[in-house]
Amino acid sequence: MSSLLVILSGATRWTQQDGTQRPTGFWSEEFAEPHKAFTEAGVELTIVTPGGRPAVVDELSLTVEANNGDEEKVAELRAYLEREDVKKLLAAPGRLEDVDPSAFDGVFIPGGHGPMQDLAVNEDVARVLQTLLPDQSKVVAGLCHGQAAFLPAGDDEGQWLFKGRRLTSFTDEEETQTGLAANAPWLIGSRLKAAGADFVPGQAWASHVVVDGNLVTGQNPASAAAAAQAVLKELAARALVA
C-alpha cells in the first residue's frame, strides 16, 4: 500500500496588496476529488497543516457561481466535506513540523489561495520537498495554487529545487478572470516562471496536468480528478519497481 502525505494550508486569510485580509482556505474540489480517489485506491493518507491548525475550506469554492452554476456538484462537495471522517481529519490534522518525509511515497499539495499565505514561506514544506523531489522513487504533486509551496524549496547549494522542471499552476490569465489579480500581492504563474520553472499553461479553466518525471502538477480546480489519477499512476509505477 502506498502512503501519501497531504499538506493543506492552515491559513484563513490572504493578505492583499492594499493590506486587506481576504477570507481564504483550501479549495473544496481540490481536496475532495483527490481525497476520494486516493482513499478508494487504498492509499494511506496523512493530512497535515503548519502547526496542526484546522484546515478550513474557502467558502467561495462551495458557491454555485464558482462551480459553473452546477448546484448538484456543490451539494456533492459540501456533503463530502461534511462526512464525519473527513470533518475529523480537517479539524485535527497532524503538524507539518513533525513530519518525517522519508516515511512517505509522495506528497500532494492542494490549492486555494491559502498556500500563497502560509505554505509559500514555510521552511518545513521546503524540508519535505527537499527530501522527496530529488528521489525518483517518490512522487511530488501540487494542484492550482498549491504550487506556491514549491517556492521556498532550495537545494544544498541554494538553487531553487524546481528550476528547469516542467510544471503548471493556476495561470495569470485565470487569476485575472477571477477579478483577484489586481489586488493580489503576487501571481503564482508569474512567480514560478520568474523562479526558473519551465511553465506549461493549458487552456483557461480546462483540465490540464503536466507530468515531469516524479513531478505531477495540475492547473486549476478542473484538473483535480485528472491530477489525482496521474499521482496514482506514478505511485503504482514506482511500487512495481520497488
Image (cartoon, rainbow, N blue to C red):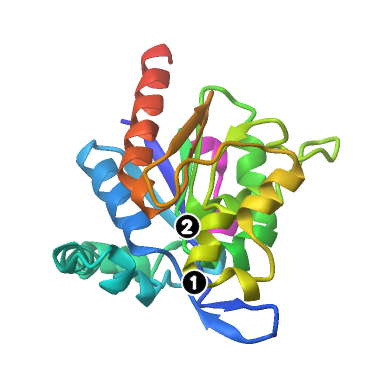
Amino acid under label 2?
A: Gly
Above or below, 84 against 237 in this view is: below
Q: Residue at x 51, y 23 (%)?
A: 137
Most distant residue in the bottom direction = 20
Q: Main secondary structure of the magenta part?
A: helix
**Residue 95 visible in rendering:** no
Q: Residue at x 75, y 45 (%)?
A: 195
SS at mark 2 in the image: loop
Report how far apart the C-alphas of labels 1 and 2 lie in the structure: 16 Å
Quarter of the image where the C terminus is located: top left
| Residue range highlighted in magenta | 95-103
Residue that numbered label 1 is attached to: 53
Residue that numbered label 2 is attached to: 111
Q: Is residue 239 magenta?
A: no
| Total marks placed | 2
Q: Counting residues from the N terminus, which is met first, the one under dot 1 or under dot 2?
A: 1
Count residues near mark 1 (Cα–Cα under 10 Å), then give few for <14, some for 14-19, many for 20+.
Answer: some
Q: Quadrant of residue 167?
A: top right
